[in-house]
Image (cartoon, helix red, strand yellow):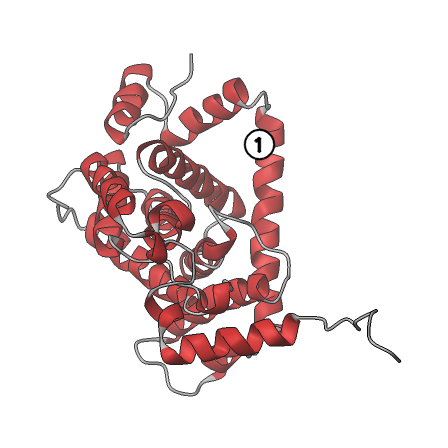
Amino acid sequence: MCYLFESFKGWKEYCESQNVSLVQSVIEYEIEQKNSSEERIWTGLQHAYSVMKDAVKTGLEDEMTSRSGMINNGAKKVFNHPLAVLSPEFQKLISRALAAKEVNSCMGRVVAAPTAGASGILPGTLVTLQEIHGLSDSKILEGLLVGAGVALIIEEKASLAGAVGGCQAETGSAAAMASGGIVYCLGGTIDQVFNAVAITIQCMLGLVCDPVAGLVEVPCVVRNASAAAIAFSSAQIALANVNAVIPVDECIEAMGEIGASMESRYKETAMGGLAATLTGQEISKRVLIQDIEILPDENLPE
C-alpha cells in the first residue's frame, strides 16, 4: 500500500516506518493510484522539466507582448538591466520566473505546476538552483517529485485553485513546492523540507486573487517573481534549522480556513483588489471592447 498524502506528519511517519525516501513514496503513489510505471514517471518528469526550461528560454529571447498590452517583455528588461540589486544570481532568478510566466500570459506552452497562474515559480527556482549548484537533471526531477507530494497534501487540506483559496492557493502552493524541492535537492532532511514549506506558507497566507480585467497577467506575473524569491528565502532559513514554530500541517489548515472565509470578490472574479481600482477598471473596459467583434445588424438597410 502506498501513502495517500493526507498530512505531512503522516508522510514523514510513513517514510520512516517503511524506510523509503520522500521521492520513492511519491513514485509508489503514482504507480498505485495513477496506474503509472516508474519509467513513465521519470520520462514525464524529464519532459515537464524540458518544457519549463524552454519556457524560461522563450520568455527571455522571444517577443513577449500580451494581447492586452499589460505584459511587455518585462523579463528581458530585468535580465538585461545593468544594476543587480543583490547579485547576478538573484537577478537571473527573478527574470526567469517572470519569463516563464510571461510565456503563459502570451499563450505559450508552460507546465501548470500546480497551476498556469503560478507557472513561472518552479521553472525560475529550479533552473537557477541547478545553475548555481551544478545539479544534474535527475536531482532536479527528484525535487519535482517532492514538490508534487507537497502539492498533493495542500490540495487535500486546503486548495491549489485561486478561485477557491485566492492567490495564496496558487503562487503560495507553487512557492511551497519549490522551497521544499530546493531543500531536498541541497541534501536537507525531511524536517527541513517540511519546515521550508511551513515558512513559505506563513509568508504567503491571505494573498488574494485579483486579476486585472480577468486576465492572468497583472499582478500574476510579478507575483511569480516574488514567490520565487520567497521560496529561496524559506529554503535558506529552513536549511539553517530555524524552526517555523507552527507545524506545517497547521499552516496548511490555516491556508484552507483563510481561503474558505475569503470573500468571493478576492477569488479570481476580478471584482476586488487591484482589479477594482480605477486603473484596473479602465483597463478592463479597454480590453473587453478590444476583444468584442462588432457584427453587422442584419435588420439594418445596407
Q: Is residue 216 above or below residue 115?
A: below
Name the residue rendered at 26%, 37% in the picture.
189
Q: Secondary structure at mark 1?
A: helix
Q: Is residue 282 above or below residue 158?
A: below
Q: Give 109 or 67, whichever is nearer the viewer.
A: 67
Query: Among all residues in the image, which is located at the extreme right?
Result: 302
Q: Is residue 9 above or below residue 202?
A: above
Position of 299 with respect to 87 (left or right) is right
Position of 48 with respect to 185 (left or right) is right
Count of all numbered marks drawn on residues in the image? 1
User: x%, y% of residue 285?
Assistant: 52, 76
Position of 184 with respect to 117 (left or right) is left
Name the residue rendered at 53%, 47% in the picture.
137
Query: Among all residues in the image, which is located at the extreme top?
Result: 1
Corner quadrant of residue 208:
bottom left
Corner quadrant of residue 234:
bottom left
Query: Among all residues in the image, which is located at the extreme left?
Result: 245
- What crowding class fits label 1: few (fewer than 14 Cα within 10 Å), some (14-19), or many (20 or more)? some
Q: Name the residue type under label 1.
A: Ile
User: x%, y% of residue 145?
Assistant: 45, 37
> Can residue 76 be seen from the camera position used here?
yes
Where does label 1 land, which residue?
A: 41
Q: Quadrant of the C terminus?
A: bottom right
Name the residue rendered at 46%, 42% in the picture.
144
User: x%, y% of residue 106?
Assistant: 61, 67
User: x%, y% of residue 36?
Assistant: 59, 24
Q: Quadrant of the N terminus?
A: top left
Corner quadrant of residue 300:
bottom right
> Can residue 68 be seen from the camera position used here?
no
Name the residue rendered at 28%, 42% in the picture.
260
Query: Among all residues in the image, which is located at the extreme bottom?
Result: 82
